[in-house]
Image (tube, grey):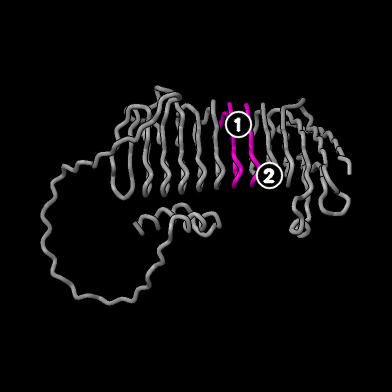
Amino acid sequence: MSDEIIEQKYEVTAPARLIISNVRGSVTIQSGEAGVIEVKAVKHGNFDNGRAAVEMTQDSDGTVRVETRSNDALFGFLSHPPRVDYTVRVPQGIHLEVSCVSSILNVSELEGVFKLKTISGNMTLAKLSGPLKLGAVSGDIDGVQLSGVIDLNTVSGRVHLTESSFPSADASTVSGDMTLQTPVAEGPYRFSSVSGSVRMLVPADTRCNVELNSVSGSIRSSLPASATSMGHGLKITQIQGGGTAVRLKSVSGGVSIETEGTPATTVQTTSPVDVTPVPPIPPIPPLPPIETPSTPQEALSTSEILQRIERGEMTVDEAIKLMKDQS
């Protein structure tokens, strides 16, 4: 069956709002003329048997909604759901919300507010300005020349954001590695991971305090740094005398502060020196043993802990505490 093309144009007032979702295919969103949202959908495959439909509507408040609707019960017996490729042009200042399953997402050259998420499809972003809330499960996220506060969550997908400016960041990952290239501003920069690592590419004059709370992760830097181990998995590193807070909580993931082109090395830690005199503790008479029933807790491997996090049965904080208790 030949492809079918659907085109719609909607008049909107500022700030325009678009909510779009797709199951399989692609979504490409670019800058268009003021006061107008233009949508072009190319449907591939058979949409006449009730398997899927493309719906475009506009709410009374002007919000434009575009959705590929699918029959999930039928898709369970199909190798691939029908595919739709969307090309959308929107005005500047857009409030954009996009959800994709295995659909590729491309967004570029826009100012606005962005809430973008994918399951297994990759996400490519370029020249975006405004608050960014990004999410992915196994899809990769690549971005260049992004500007704004960033809120990021991923499971196993890789994150690579370069030539950007993030005044603060709040990001979490299970096993995917993250790279953020940005000047360090007022912050804070908060990260959490299980086994994924965090790499920040920063200017040569960067000053920051790196705090790592981890079972086995390490701190690396290509800038002058001094580190102190505070015990209980907490390490604090001052980069060039210290400054903005950069915090990572992980099981085995580490954090690296680097300048481009200069390799980072592991920062050696020293134990804090306690100069406060401690008075002698008088002996305490032994107490009779108290017998209490106890149930031994099953020890979990790192792979089992990762699986529980991916299934939503355990948080990253719970995983870190369990790994410390078992070590």
Q: Residue 199, how many percent across, how many down? A: 46, 35
Secondary structure at numbered mark 1: loop
The N terminus, quarter of image: top right
The magenta segment? 119-148
Secondary structure at numbered mark 2: strand
Q: Is residue 305 left or right of residue 69?
A: left
Image point (29%, 36%), residue name: 268
Q: Amino acid at mark 2?
A: Ser
Q: Residue 157, how many percent across, how many down? A: 57, 43
- The residue labelled by disc 2 is 99
Q: Residue 138, how many percent across, how many down? A: 59, 46
Q: Amino acid at mark 1?
A: Gly
| The magenta stretch spans residue 141 | yes
Image point (38%, 47%), residue name: 214
- Disc number placed over residue 311 in the picture, else none: none
Quarter assignment of residue 255? top left
Residue density around tag 2, few if under 14, some if 14–19, many if 20 or more, within 10 Å: many
Q: Is residue 226 left or right of residue 129?
A: left
